[in-house]
Amino acid sequence: MEDIVESREHEVSCEECRLQPSCLSGGIAAEYLKRMEDLVDTRRRVKRSEHLFRAGDEFKNIYAIRSGFFKTSLVDVEGREQVTGFFMGGELLGMDGLSRGRCESSAIALEDSDVCAMPYILIEKIGREVPMLQRRLQSLLAREINRDHGIMLLLGSMGGEARLAAFLLNLSRRFLLRGYSGSDFILRMTRQEIGSYLGLKLETVSRLFTAFHKRGLLEVRHKQVRIVDVDGLSRVLALRD
């Protein structure tokens, strides 16, 4: 794509990459990690606001995020964007294209990001030689299905406060898994994008952030969020409004 820059700067092997445990090579025996590096066709830099892929593109690659943050989204018949997910370093993008051979959603960088592009045809080939790769891919696909079911539950059974609490606690866990602070982080997405994802109006999201701040659950300064009371936020989620 014209808006993606291929890069070989600061290359890090799968074995040395600190995000390896959560990537496609996670859980693969050490003797196979060098073989796993054959999966990476190119390492690419995607600048903020640019597309990694678009809905309807031919499915060719699964992308591992090395650094940065992405959102996935769809556009309805009236031209409105519906955010379907947020993805950070160590997570995979593009797997929704497996079923139909076309990308089901668009992926847009929320900040300058780096990804490893892994052609699916190579994943299939190496998977025949390394069966644990097939099992790992199946595990990650199952995780995606569970994530989608979780979103449906979130939107179908929770009120606004519980939705935002669940969103923040989920981000917190994911940051922790990657060795970052789970209580102090920057939101790379806008309030409007959060609202689109959670099925809430922009005004509602802003009001809830203010309410959580006043109740001592969060400290909010623009996009910087610090979770002050994790237990309190968990109780909001438990109430489900």
Image (cartoon, rainbow, N blue to C red):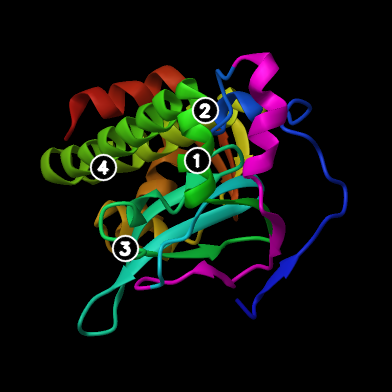
| Numbered tag placed on residue 104 in the rendering | 3
**How far apart in space, not on screen, are marks 4 and 2 (Cα)?**
30 Å
Q: Give the residue number, with chain letter if any, for mark 2.
A: 129
**How far apart in space, not on screen, are marks 3 and 4 (Cα)?**
14 Å
Q: Residue at x 46, y 31 (%)?
A: 128
Q: Give the residue number, with chain letter if any, for mark 4.
A: 148
The stretch of residues the image draws in magenta is 29-56
Q: Position of residue 224 (x, y in %)?
A: 62, 47
Q: Position of residue 198 (x, y in %)?
A: 29, 52
| Numbered tag placed on residue 61 in the rendering | none
In this view, the mark in front (4 or 1): 1
Q: Is residue 136 left or right of residue 51?
A: left
Q: Residue at x 52, y 28 (%)?
A: 129
Amino acid type for the residue under numbered disc 1: Lys
Residue 128 painted magenta: no
User: Does dot 2 land on a helix, a strand or a loop?
Assistant: helix
Q: Residue furthest bottom?
A: 78
In this view, the mark in front (4 or 2): 2
Q: Quadrant of the C terminus?
A: top left
Q: Residue furthest left?
A: 157
Q: Position of residue 211 (x, y in %)?
A: 38, 44
**How far apart in space, not on screen, are marks 3 and 1 (Cα)?**
24 Å
Residues marked 1 and 2 touching at CB (< 8 Å): yes
**Nearer to the camera, 52 or 172:** 52
User: Does dot 3 land on a helix, a strand or a loop?
Assistant: loop
Q: Residue at x 68, y 25 (%)?
A: 33
Q: Give the residue number, with chain letter if any, for mark 1.
A: 125
The image quarter containing residue 57 is: bottom left
Q: Residue at x 35, y 22 (%)?
A: 234
**How far apart in space, not on screen, are marks 2 and 3 (Cα)?**
29 Å
